[in-house]
Image (tube, rainbow, N blue to C red):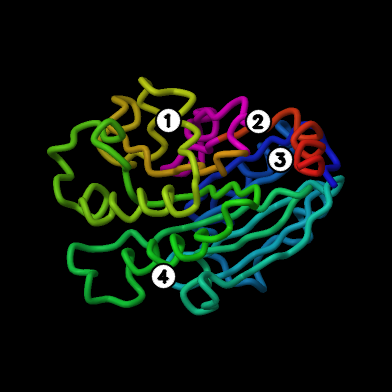
Amino acid sequence: MVAADRIRVVSWNVNGIRARWPRLAELLREQRPDVVCLQETRCPDHYFPYGDLADLGYDAQHSSGCNGAGVAILVRSDHEMASRSVALDEDHGIAQGRWLQVTVDGIEISSVYVPAGSLDEESDSEGKLAFLEAIARQVYGEQERPMLITGDFNVAPTDQDVYEPGWLEDSSHTGEAERKSVREIIEEGELVDVYRRLHPQERGYTCWDQRNGHYARDYGLRIDLALASEHLTPYVTRCDVNHTYRQGRKSSNHAPLEIELDALKERCEAAIAA
């Protein structure tokens, strides 16, 4: 049963939740999103700010990891949240700190942090390509479920998603193997890249190098994605990059991606009728 007719989801690679806490707390107080998916929390679970988040009115689930990983999902306390899985493709090890999925008001929402990768990871069973393949296996056969997968994929899907493709030619952000793996996720899960569906001509960059004024010049990458089930996509009314939290003090090198779903009670009633 869907408890709300409209849900606003924010996905943000915070690049360290403790370093980014003032800006995250500001976002939660001022924007009051329904769900927040975080990546790169870089925080052992015993230091994760569960209490501070509760004081702000959010329940949280966190999967800590090593080497700069860590993902979390924050859900405003007026929503029903059920934990579904901390495993990916039935593997807890590959998922730790990189994949977390919960059900919120009947929608399965995932926060994902794909390893940044290297040029020689085909031989690495825990590397970037293996992780992307595990996501594709996870979503295969779950096409009937209303899914929203958000997070840092560390892959720019096409050259349109890179300021200067020649700078990163054949890198793990733009390599054909990585792009093919993202396409396979979309195809296997019958998913839609909702930002590109809503904004076919815009850049939509979400990540910029902290050095050399890349953000000011908009020398960026669109590597933070929101993938929604095809049958859920008609209810996605907005998907935008929020530059407010990329600017100012203590900002991450990523900007939050905001997704809004509307008329969800209508979707629920249609699903029941079917």
Q: Residues within 10 Å of mark 2 (few under 14, many from 20)?
A: some
Q: Residues within 10 Å of mark 3 (few under 14, many from 20)?
A: some
Task: Give x and y (percent) for residue 174.
Answer: 23, 47
Task: Give x and y (percent) for residue 200.
Answer: 39, 23
SS at badge 2: helix
* 233 relative to 212 in the view: left or right: right
Q: How far apart are the alpha carbons under marks 2 and 1?
A: 15 Å
97 or 268, which is in the foreground? 268
Residue carrying label 3: 28
SS at badge 3: helix
Kindly report which numbered mark, 4 or 2, lies closer to the viewer in this rendering.
Answer: 2
Q: Is residue 170 above or below residue 199?
A: below
Question: Could you tell me the amino acid type at mark 1?
Answer: Arg
Q: How far apart are the alpha carbons under marks 4 and 3?
A: 27 Å
Q: How far apart are the alpha carbons under marks 3 and 2?
A: 23 Å
Q: How far apart are the alpha carbons under marks 3 and 1?
A: 26 Å
Q: Is residue 88 above or below residue 212?
A: below
- The residue at the point 52 percent across, 28 percent down is 240
Task: Compare marks 2 and 1 and give the one earlier in the sequence.
Answer: 1
Residue carrying label 2: 235
Question: Could you tell me the amino acid type at mark 2?
Answer: Tyr
Residue carrying label 4: 67
